[in-house]
Image (cartoon, coloured by chain):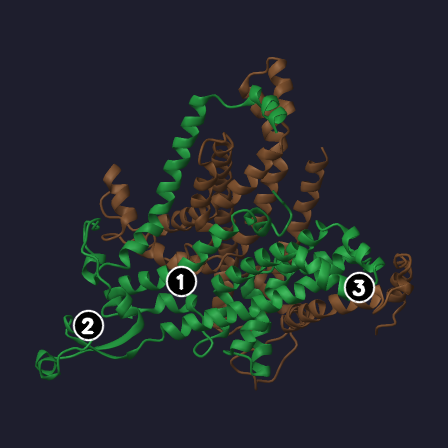
Chain colours: A green, B brown
Amino acid sequence: MSARDQARSIVEPAPFSRRLAALVIVVYALVSSIPLAWIVATSFKTPNDAIAYPPKLVFTPSLEGYVNLFTARTRQTPEYLASLPPPETWYEELVRKRNMVITGPSRFAGRYANSLIIGFGSTFFAVLLGTFAAYAFSRFGIPLKEDLLFFILSTRMFPPIAVAIPIYLMYRQLGLTDTQLGMIILYTAVNLSLSVWLLKGFIDEIPKEYEEAAMVDGYSRLQAFRKVVLPQAATGIAATAIFCLIFAWNEYAFALLLTSGLAQTAPPFIPNIIGEGGLDWPAVAAGTTLFLLPVMIFTILLRKHLLRGITFGALRR
Amino acid sequence: MNETPASSDSRSRRAPPAGGAALRPGLSDRTVAWLFVAPTLFLLLAINIFPLLWNVYLSFTNFKANAPGRPLRWLGLRNYERLLANEDIWASMQVTARFVFWSILFQVLLGFALAWLINRRFKGHAFWTTVIVVPMMLSPAVVGVFWTYLFQPQAGIFNYIVNFFYDFGDFTMIGDPDLAMWAIVLVDTWMWTPFVMLICLAGLRAVPDHLYEAAEVDGASSWRQFWTITVPLVLPFLMLAVLFRGIENFKMFDMVVELTSGGPGSATELASIYLKREAFEKWRTGFSAALAVVLFVTVFGVANIYVKVLNRVKER
């Protein structure tokens, strides 16, 4: 380590240029964070504050956006509202102030649940199948191996809309349109390319000798796979799973075309959160915030593997 | 079908199983290999290849998905002829090309510059890298939705900030045919510059220090070092980033649909958006299938040529 540092010292950047670099990077990071910060702030505004001119930097925070996101409401006359018993909860009170009453839950929670079910379901299968295939591609001499691997990768190159035409027809025939099962199968297939390529990279890094030693000791190939390779590949499997989950979570084109109600995920739903007289921006911002938050957390967890994930394992570090 | 000469031929070419395999308990390596690969291949055949072939078949017919009972007619190459003569398709291809070119140009310049600065290894650079990277992990459709809010002519923070520095008066990024293209380029650049940055950073870190040391000893200026060492060695990485971004932006649909839905007019109507209108709004399924085939072939062909060039650059 110390020898390496000494060797580097000649080309080490000067303190001044280093400080300047730091300054530019910090400014870029802050400026590029404005859109997200603004959306999170908007989710705590009232509808009036959200469309105020000039844009309000200082405002009284309100949970109206979140209440509107999760409830369906109707406007009532003041006479009718006066005839009602006093509101029982803080959110009813909030809605009453706008001359409205809550008529029930909105569809957002259901769409969010669909995103979770389809995301986790497809991730599970993509990683399961991907682990098996990646192990086989990593360890065995499979005929036409390079071609098969390229074929698997190429399935990711096609525009989703182009693939969607025949899938739409096929799903209609099979009764899979607008079902969670249909979306899980589809996202599994789409994520397989990523999962096979990433996991092959991770498994390639586990020395073959480990399993060979285990097999000399009397393990079968499957036992060696389960007891030696899988524990070694655990980090890689976890990182791959998060990448698959983020993809399925973010996907929009297939969800837009193949789901409409029961199995619709959050991305095609969020732009349709309508308030009176157009989009209800605080509610849209609230939905956006709740939808993006898990991805931001996962990004932080993944930071060491990001490069590998976004390049399908082509680059490691 | 399985026993075609080609497949038995390739089987005989396979490397023999590792020594001592026969003595091992359990399934043979060959069985395990096929058991492990088969589910993946089966699923991809069912969900990718079969639909793809069906799509090619449909592209020769007059099929309409919203009228499945209509008698199916074989049109031969008629759909493809119509497609080549269609001016709207050319317009959408041009819009796509512009979008791909400008977004990638900005991302490459900005991404490389940022990577170069982060590679100064100042204190806290890992933290700030993570902050910068966040936009690219978000859902493009949802990004499109919230940028429509940021681009609002009155309440939008984007317009407010721009007018804060220079008063352009009222303008609307997504409502003006001249500005809409720049709006989608801007949002795409905001989202994906970190992607190019990460890949360039990997390239910069792969440049061995001894090259710079040797150049330093020879008295080469830092400008010269940059052009003779840094740029050529990072180029393959940069080209890889351009490949990924090129394919992704050629396919672009979600972010732009939510941001401008192809408008105003057809100012930002990318190929995918045009295809969606033809296939799922006008229900010209046969014609759209032909367009889908053309898009497949384009991505595949261009990507293949590009990879060949990339490999040549890498070998140098």
Are dots 2 and 1 on a single chain?
yes
Residue labelled with disc 1? A291
Which residue is most to the bottom?
B69
- Horizontal placement of A41 versus A137: left or right? left
Query: From this viewpoint, is residue A234 visible?
Result: yes
For marks 2 and 1, give the CA distance.
Answer: 23 Å
The amino acid on which the numbered mark 2 sits, given as a three-letter code, is Val
Question: Which of B150 and B305 lies nearest the eye of the viewer?
Answer: B150
In contact (CB < 8 Å): disc 3 and disc 2 = no
Please give the chain letter of the residue carrying mark 2: A
**Is residue A78 shown left or right of residue A198?**
left
| Chain containing the residue with disc 1 | A
Name the residue beneath numbered marker 2. Answer: A95
User: For the image shown, how many numbered marks are present on the structure?
Assistant: 3
Q: Which residue is mark 3?
A: A221
Q: Residue at x 57, y 63 (%)?
A: B83
Q: Amino acid at mark 3?
A: Arg
Residue situated in front as seen by the camera: A143 or B59: A143
Taking B13 as reference, is A100 above or below it? below
- Where residue B315 sits: x, y (%)? 73, 36
Q: Residues within 10 Å of mark 3 (few under 14, many from 20)?
A: many
Label 2: state its secondary structure. Answer: helix
Q: CA distance from mark 3 to mark 2?
A: 63 Å
Closer to the chain start, of discs 2 and 1, is: 2
User: Is the residue at mark 3 from the same chain as the one at mark 1?
Assistant: yes
